[in-house]
């Protein structure tokens, strides 16, 4: 079986009709526009796995530049445009005070976290407060923090304190 690279080395866009997927066609367009047919296989992978709008922005940036190595410039810009997963996934340590124990608050947080695909834990503290950790997409964590300010019907929340920390969780636990 031939590798993608071997197939593409012999590919003639005018006569060959083996391109069956739209992303392959777009990858050939990238390679041609960047004058970088040597890395066509890389552009195929990018066209298949990356969002088209990001690829188009990076391509536009590279084409408009007077740089000699447009392929390298394209890859640099693509790296800048891609969101860093570390920026998207965060962990919030949330301390909730008030009447927050024996009112179903931990179960409430568990249910709401599961709905949003967040992991973490919720634990009652000896001082009567509740400490919860939420790990996942920051926007979803912000949603659950907002819900924590009111909590379940029987709860009376006095204060919610949020601290962002570096800690990962794989599931949500009630401790």
Image: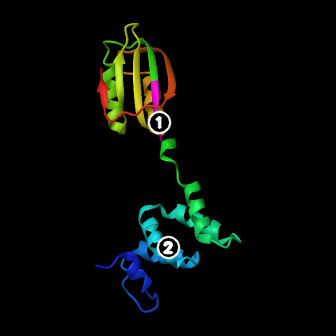
- Secondary structure beneath dot 2 equals helix
Residue 25, percent from left and from top = 45, 77
Looking at the rendering, which quadrant does residue 9 occupy? bottom left
Which residue lies most toward the top here?
127
Magenta extent: 89-93
Q: Residue 59: which disc?
A: none
Is residue 91 in the magenta section?
A: yes
Q: Residue, x 46% and y 91% (percent of image)? A: 14
Q: Residues within 10 Å of mark 2 (few under 14, many from 20)?
A: some
Question: Can residue 101 be seen from the camera position used here?
Answer: yes
Residue 97, percent from left and from top = 45, 13
Q: Quadrant of the C terminus?
A: top left
Q: Which is more toward the observer, 170 or 110?
A: 170
Question: Can residue 153 be seen from the camera position used here?
Answer: no
Q: Which is more toward the observer, 103 or 1?
A: 1
Q: Residue, x 45% and y 18% (percent of image)? A: 95
- Secondary structure beneath dot 1 equals strand
Q: Residue 90: which disc?
A: 1
Q: Quadrant of the N terminus?
A: bottom left
Is residue 17 in the magenta section?
A: no
Answer left or right for 105 relative to 23: left
Looking at the rendering, which quadrant does residue 141 occupy? top left
Q: Residue, x 48% and y 33% (percent of image)? A: 142
Marks 2 and 1, the one that precedes in the sequence = 2
Residue 171, percent from left and from top = 31, 34
Q: Residues within 10 Å of mark 1 (few under 14, many from 20)?
A: some
Q: Residue, x 35% and y 22% (percent of image)? A: 122
* Residue beneath disc 2: 39
Query: Relative to 147, is 28 above or below?
Result: below
């Amino acid at each position: 079986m031939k590798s993608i690279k071997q197939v593409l080395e012999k590919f003639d866009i005018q006569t060959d009709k083996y391109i069956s997927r739209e992303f392959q066609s777009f990858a050939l367009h990238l390679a041609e526009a960047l004058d970088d047919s040597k890395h066509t296989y890389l552009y195929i992978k990018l066209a298949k796995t990356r969002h088209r709008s990001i690829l188009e922005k990076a391509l536009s940036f590279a084409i408009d530049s007077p740089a000699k190595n447009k392929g390298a410039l394209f890859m640099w810009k693509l790296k800048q445009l891609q969101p860093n997963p570390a920026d998207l996934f965060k962990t919030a340590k949330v301390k909730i005070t008030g009447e927050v124990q024996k009112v179903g608050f931990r179960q409430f947080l568990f249910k709401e976290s599961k709905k949003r695909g967040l992991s973490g834990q919720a634990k009652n503290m000896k001082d009567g407060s509740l400490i919860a950790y939420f790990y996942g997409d920051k926007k979803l964590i912000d949603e659950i923090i907002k819900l924590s300010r009111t909590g379940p019907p029987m709860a009376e929340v006095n204060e919610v304190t949020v601290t962002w920390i570096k800690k990962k969780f794989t599931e949500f636990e009630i401790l």
